[in-house]
Image (cartoon, coloured by chain):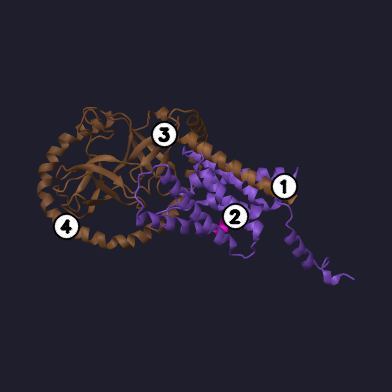
Chain colours: A purple, B brown
Amino acid sequence: MPTATVLALRLTALGLLAVLLQVSAVSQLTVFGTNADVVPLVVAFVGLLAGTVNAAIFGFVAGLFIDTALIGTLGLSSLVYVAIGYGAGRLRELRDPQSALVPLAVGAVASAAAAFGFALMQFLLGAEAPVSFELIRQLVVATLVSTLVALPVYAGVRRGLLPALPDDPRRRRRRAYTTGGLSPLSRP
Amino acid sequence: MHDKTIRRRRAVLLGLVVGSLLLLTASFGESAGGGLGAIQRGVSTVLTPVQEGASRALKPVRDGVGWVGDTFDAKGENEQLRADLAQARRFKVDAEALRRENAQMRDLLDLNDRLQIQDMGLVAARVIGRTPNVLNQVVKINQGSSDGVRPGHPVVTGRGLVGTVDTVTSNSAFVTLVTDADFGAGVKISEGGITGTVRPAAGAPRELRMEDTEATDDVRRDDTLVTSGTSDPEFPSPFPPDVPIGKVTEVEDPGSDSQVIHVMPFVDVRDLDFVEVITKMDPSRS
């Protein structure tokens, strides 16, 4: 089966699982008065692992699915998740960061973007709520709670997608060095 | 080749953003019975059994996390509870005399109350999902139009008002909670009959605000808020009267037109497992 098809199938399964897990379980686990949101994390990590285009499409479809499942305003989540996926994908393409803490930082930014992005969109759509200190505090707490689960979510997304991703040149080069056969130093 | 990749990337982004905006515009401007809404309700109907199964399977995990959270909350509530206990002891002495008198009247009223509840078609439901963001406070329950649930029906627990049914599918319904940014209800102070409107305090899931009171209204801490029911037949209330909502915790700038009344809801919307939907409103009661 072509690599692109395998990746598409895995992304579809990942999206379904993430949205179902979010609406059925994670959203009902209250921590510090709020709950984690794993969907923006999954979208951002797809961007980190699979690139801009894949992540933006994944974000659009995941957003569409979650708005459909929760009978929300269609397109709202898609718009926020497309931005998150595209941003994470661009980070990978421009910087390709390798630190072990990158998923945590990306998870925090993605969670903040989702929390504040949804609030902003709902204000733009006419939600009658004052911008108060409590609201800001709740959004910050929601961001922190989501960030707490960033690393396990990243591990799960990586595990799910890695077999379907084209072999990364950097990883292939690193493996070649460690096995010794292709090191420039060993060449005659 | 590189330019082609960039062009493709930008085209995809542009297409997705435009697609999202088109969906947003279509969905936002659509009437309740529109085509997109019908698709959403169809998908939700299909997903409900899956969600219900997942919700049941993950109940032990939720309970575990809830226990940890409750332990932290309990430390903070301990001091308040001690004060409440001291006050309760004082009330107990007064209440004992009233209790005997009340018991005779209660026996008479109990039967009547039970019949009224039966007449109002209570439908018990399990909470099987909720929205993840702060402003949009909605829960999904596992009873829908086939059980008689309709948009606008009030939803309660044993502690008081939970919210109103918003959207309904055949086997599920979405309930807008009292803490949702768009929620509002006519209320009165049960002790003094002062009327007003209750709205959520955005970002504070354990707080409501009573508005539309007058400077002369004497609202005090620990006063109880209940639904006011219908006062003008032209504008019928969706709620029956006297459904408990919450307790006044603080009055800012009392005696002024801008007084802000903080209310703690009796129902903890973060911890809902079972609710009841009032499906038959008796017009004479509302």
Residue in the foreground of this view, choosing between A55 and B125 = A55
Disc nearer the start of the sequence (3/4): 4
Single out the mark in the foreground, 1 or 4: 1
Circle 3 sits on which residue?
B167
Disc nearer the start of the sequence (3/1): 1
Question: What chain does mark 4 sit on?
Answer: B
How far, Cα to Cα, is label 3 from label 1? 46 Å
Under circle 1, the secondary element is: helix
Q: Amino acid at mark 4?
A: Arg
Q: Amino acid at mark 2?
A: Ala
**How far from the left and from the top, in percent, is residue B169?**
45, 31
Q: Are marks 1 and 4 on the same chain?
A: yes
Single out the mark in the foreground, 4 or 2: 2
Which residue is outermost to the right?
Answer: A188
Disc nearer the start of the sequence (1/4): 1
Note whether A186 is above or below B60 in the view shown.
below
Q: Amino acid at mark 1?
A: Lys
Circle 2 sits on which residue?
A88
Question: What chain does mark 2 sit on?
Answer: A
Instruction: Name the mark on residue B175.
Output: none
Magenta region: A149-156
Circle 1 sits on which residue?
B4
Note whether B199 is above or below B250 in the view shown.
above
- Residue at screen point 32% across, 52% down: B206
Under circle 3, the secondary element is: strand
Look at the numbered discs 3 and 1 and tell me whether their residues touch, using CB distance below 8 Å.
no
Which quadrant of the figure contains the C terminus of chain B? top left
**How far from the left and from the top, in percent, is residue A112?**
49, 56
Q: Amino acid at mark 3?
A: Thr
Residue in the foreground of this view, choosing between A60 and B112 = A60
